[in-house]
């Protein structure tokens, strides 16, 4: 029904709704959107970009990802992931051959060395390793290092498992 009391349907109803919407927009005083702009005075660029940089030009993937990481606030998780993903680049190839990062929690990095000798060496190098990590991934990502040697073998499972007290004097 329209304001006149007559019954409308189909195209007449659509036209009446459109006219009412136009009247409300004009009463509100909003500017009308054009085909080339967003209504806020800025014009959308059309055609070819021409020589020189343009926001429509293809962007390098690294730059786009950096903007996304900053916009979402993912700098800290990305830096933590770099410690694990680029361990060789972060600490150097020689140290990386003999160690691996195990866990990073609350700024404390746990590193497992290949041997107890390398664990001792890494403990002596802990200060310089922290500086290298800070240079590569940023300050306060890793504040403390926990370095331990390789895990001892477990005799609780396996093909040579024997019930009883376990290995006592087998190495002598």
Image (spheres, rainbow, N blue to C red):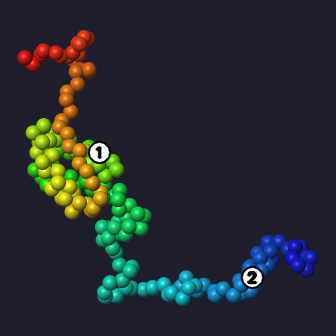
Q: Is residue 156 above or below residue 131?
A: above
Residue pictured at 21% horizontal, 15% vertical: 166
Q: What is the distance, in whole Å, between disc 1 and disc 2 at their CAs?
A: 61 Å
Q: Is residue 21 above or below residue 142?
A: below
SS for dot 2: helix
Residue pictured at 38% horizontal, 67% vertical: 70
- Judge by depth and name the residue closer to the eye, 145 or 161: 145
Q: Which residue is mark 1?
A: 103
Residue 33 visible (yes or no): yes
- Judge by depth and name the residue closer to the eye, 170 or 20: 170
- Judge by depth and name the residue closer to the eye, 118 or 50: 118
Any mark on residue 20, and which? none
Quadrant in which residue 111 is drawn: top left
Instruction: Return the x and y of residue 48 as percentages of the image width and height.
Output: 39, 85
- Judge by depth and name the residue closer to the eye, 121 or 92: 121
Residue 89 visible (yes or no): no
Q: Along the horizontal axis of the image, is 36 left or right of 18?
A: left
Q: Which residue is mark 2?
A: 24
Q: Residue furthest right?
A: 5
Q: Along the horizontal axis of the image, is 54 left or right of 102?
A: right
- Pointer 1 with pointer 2, Cβ within 8 A: no
Residue pictured at 27% horizontal, 62% vertical: 138
Q: Is residue 159 above or below residue 42?
A: above
The N terminus sits in image quarter? bottom right
**Which label lies toward us, 1 or 2?**
1
């Amino acid at each position: 029904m329209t304001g006149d009391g007559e019954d409308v349907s189909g195209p007449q109803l659509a036209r009446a709704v459109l006219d009412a919407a136009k009247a409300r927009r004009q009463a509100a005083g909003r500017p009308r959107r054009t085909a080339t702009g967003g209504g806020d005075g800025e014009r959308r660029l059309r055609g070819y970009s021409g020589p020189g940089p343009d926001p429509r030009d293809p962007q390098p993937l690294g730059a786009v990802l950096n903007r996304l990481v900053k916009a979402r606030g993912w700098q800290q998780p990305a830096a933590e992931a770099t410690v694990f993903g680029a361990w060789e680049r972060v600490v150097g190839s020689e140290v990386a051959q003999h160690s691996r990062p195990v866990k990073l929690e609350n700024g404390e990095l746990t590193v497992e060395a290949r041997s107890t000798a390398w664990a001792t060496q890494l403990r002596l190098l802990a200060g310089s390793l922290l500086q290298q990590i800070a240079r590569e991934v940023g300050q306060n990502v890793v504040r403390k290092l926990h370095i331990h040697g390789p895990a001892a073998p477990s005799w609780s499972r396996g093909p040579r498992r024997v019930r009883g007290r376990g290995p006592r004097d087998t190495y002598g």
